[in-house]
Structures are given as structure tokens and as C-alpha cells.
Image (cartoon, rainbow, N blue to C red):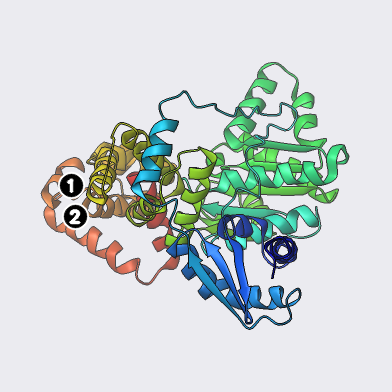
Amino acid sequence: MENNLLKENWSKVLDNLEKKISKPTLKTWFVNVEPIQFFNGVLKINVPNKLVKNWLESKFNIILLKTIKEFLPELKAIEYIINNQNNNQEYYKKTVIKKFSYQQKLTIFEINPSTNLNPKYRFENFVVGSNNDLAFAAAQGVVNNLGEKFNPLFIYGGVGLGKTHLLQAIGNEIIRKYGLNKKVRYATTEQFTNDLINSLKNQNIDEFRQKFRDIDVLILDDVHFLSGKNKSQEELFHTFNELYNLKKQIVFSSDRPPRMIPDIEERLQSRFEGGLIVDITPPDYETRLAILKIKNQEKNYFLPDKILEILAQKIVKNIRELEGGLNFIAFKLSRFNNYDEDKVINLINEYLRQNIKKVSYKKILKIVADFYNLKEDDLLKKLRKKEVIKPRQVLIYLLRDIGKFSYSFIGEILNKRDHTTILYSYEKIEKEIKENIDLFQEIEVLKEKIIN
């Protein structure tokens, strides 16, 4: 088949595929993928590297075969051919080193003052994986069925996993789809609270309420910060009721599920739980690599795939650290005329060492106290109040498990409690997290806050 006709059909294949898989998936795995030959029923397809080859063969081969056969009925099989031209060291030296010898042009995204949204956050550049596919599908469902399906939508997950990206992408997609017909307002809970405080101070509460109620979509980020803020909770409760009754869309995010947010009104918690609750977990290897490929392209780093594969293997905690590692490696390698795999691994280890610091007991104490909305002194004193006993045992467990402090040192911190008391508390929590899923989730959230 002639090359021009092959490419023309391939364009139709990609258009057809877009109806069957998400745009981010298409952009991640089908960029730089193109047919090069069709002979005797076998279509040879050029792919950029081994990872894409393995992924297409294992995940997309059947759907690709069916789609291509719509345009090439005589197709029998697909053969994936790796194109190595962009993976060699000479290519890297010619492109990466040259790129970093000039000041790179940066794209500046301005936040829209009427919506508070940053246009750089889009569905198209949100990498979908097994860790977030349900949350992504729910976000798309919200856009297509405003106020009717998944209302409210509550997304929770740890630090740096993409919650803010997905929330803002919802807002930006609504504006793209509905234009001026829908009024969207995105805010962090801290902004919501500060606006409320200022409105009370300046005696213009009506202006505040109009800002958050005279809209079609409210997107509120990090609602766990409402813990202990009674006036903000009351205002959000009434705002929620008014919007919900008018069938307006509401979206929330938090670092934990609603039932784990301490010191929050039961009536507000029930509102959070009234729609769909979905979580985002740390990305798996394939998703981490896909994220790196997109960032590498967006930032014009031109790092070879082998380096991205090593980064994806080594950095596993969250997307924020992953992007930081990419920036670090790109900058460091720009200063060398040549490199090898050992050099890359040493640089990644250097980056990881910079990010690992011994955790102080004061940091653990503060995080546990904030999480349970207690004073630090309450955890240290020999109080027997019911609301303090469990958080104190959790504190002891984390001081030992994360801080690696000795039982005797922990006893000194907690006003000279004896070794057996500390050991009992540690073992109690260690046993209970194997049986109590709620406590297990609390501990995991706390661990992530401490480590990050």
C-alpha cells in the first residue's frame, strides 16, 4: 500500500480510537506511533521504545486490530517495530545539551479572576492510570451531567497525587463545553474561610454569599481544613443546601474520606457523603512513566526514554516528587558532555537523599495533634480523657514506626512514662490496624503527611 494512503487511513484509525479510549490515554501511548508498511496482511507500526511496544501489545492490540480492520479488511496481524533514533547518546548530546544552552521560553498561565481557575489544568494533560481511573471517569460524568450525576463529587487522596489538577480540569472543561452559560467558582477551603472572615470583619456577608451561591458549579479544594472551624462549616452547610436544592453542581477534595475529618459537624459530613466518594492512590510504574513522558515533552527536555524509565522505577511516592526529579535530572545532565546509566542512577539517588530528612519528634507530634484537632500539650500530659487516649497511642506508634525512636526516649517525651506503657500502646495500635480499616486509613494518611 502506498505511504500516503497508509497515513491517511492511520489518521482515520486514530479518530476512531478516540471514541473508544480517553484522549489522555491516546496522547500518552500513541504519540510518535505510525504505520510504515502493509504487506501480505501484516501492518508494521513504528513505535518509539520498548515500553510503548509492550504496552500496545498487551493492552491495545485487540482494539487496534478491530479498529484498523474497519479500514483495512485484509489485515491479519500487527508487528510493532522499535525506532531507536531518539534513544541514543549522540541524539541526547545534540538536543538536550543544546536546549539548555539557551534560555527556554516559558508558557505563563494566568489564573482567571472570575473563576479562580488555572487554564493549564486540563483533562487532556491528566494522565489516567489504574490509580485514578475511577476519579477521572467520575470527573467526566460531572461535566456531562451537571447537578444530576455524582452530586456532590468527593475526591480524596494523599499529597501530590493530582487532586487539584483534576478539580480544576473539571472547571476548565465545563467552561470549554458550556461557555458563558455556566458560572464556575473554584476555591481552596483556606480561601473560602479567609473570604468569610474578611466579609464578617467588613460587614459585607451578603457579598460573600453571592460570590459562592450565585453560581452553577462550586469546586472546593482541601475541605479537611474545615476541621474545627465552626463558622466556616455553618456557612458551607447553608451554601451547599442552596446550591444543591437548585441542582447546581458541587465538587470537593480532601486528603482523607469524610468520616476521617475530625471535629466536623455531622450534618456537613452527611452532605459530603451524599453523592459519590472516590479516591486517588499513588501511581503505578506505567502511570509514572506516562506522566514523565508528557512532562518531558511539555518542558522540551528531550531526555531519552531510558532515563525516564529509571526515574519511574526509583521515584514512587507522588507526582510532585516525580516532576521534581525530572527537573533535577534535566538540569544536572545539561552540565555534562556525556553520561551513562550509572551517572543517571547516582544523580537520582542524590535527588532522593536531598528529599529524605530525619523526621523530628516535634514534627510528628504537631501533625498528629493537628489531625485530631488537639493541642500538643494534651497529648503529652497524663490526661485520661477519652478523646486523647487513642490519638496519644497513635502518636506513640508513629514515633516508633516512622521516627525510629527508642521506647525509653518516647517515654521521656511523654512526661516520663515507663517503658511498658509505651510498648503496650505501640503493640495495641500495631494489632488494631490489622483489624480496623478506618484506623489503618488514618495511620496511612498520617504517615504520608509526616514523610512528605
On screen, residue 434 versus residue 58, left or right, reads left
Nearest the eye: 445 or 240: 445
Residue occupied by mark 2: 422
Q: In the rendered view of the protein, which quadrant contains the N terminus?
A: bottom right
Q: Give the amino acid type for the residue marked by disc 2 in the picture.
A: Ile
Whether residue 255 appears in this view of the structure is no
Where disc 1 sits, the SS reads: helix
Nearest the eye: 68 or 260: 68
- Name the residue located 46 percent from the left edge and 61 percent from the top edge: 286
Whether residue 361 appears in this view of the structure is yes
The mark tally for this picture is: 2
Q: Is residue 143 above or below residue 376?
A: below
- Name the residue located 57 percent from the left edge and 71 percent from the top edge: 44
On screen, residue 377 versus residue 387, left or right, reads left
Q: x, y percentage for residue 211?
A: 77, 30
Q: x, y percentage for residue 418?
A: 13, 51
Task: Tell me which label, 2 or 1, sits earlier in the chain.
Answer: 1
Q: Give the farthest residue toward the right.
A: 181
Q: x, y percentage for residue 86?
A: 44, 50
- Name the residue located 71 percent from the left edge and 54 percent from the top edge: 152
Q: Are marks 2 and 1 in contact (CB under 8 Å)?
A: yes
Residue occupied by mark 1: 410
Q: x, y percentage for residue 102?
A: 45, 24
Where disc 2 sits, the SS reads: helix
Q: Give the amino acid type for the residue marked by disc 1 in the picture.
A: Ile
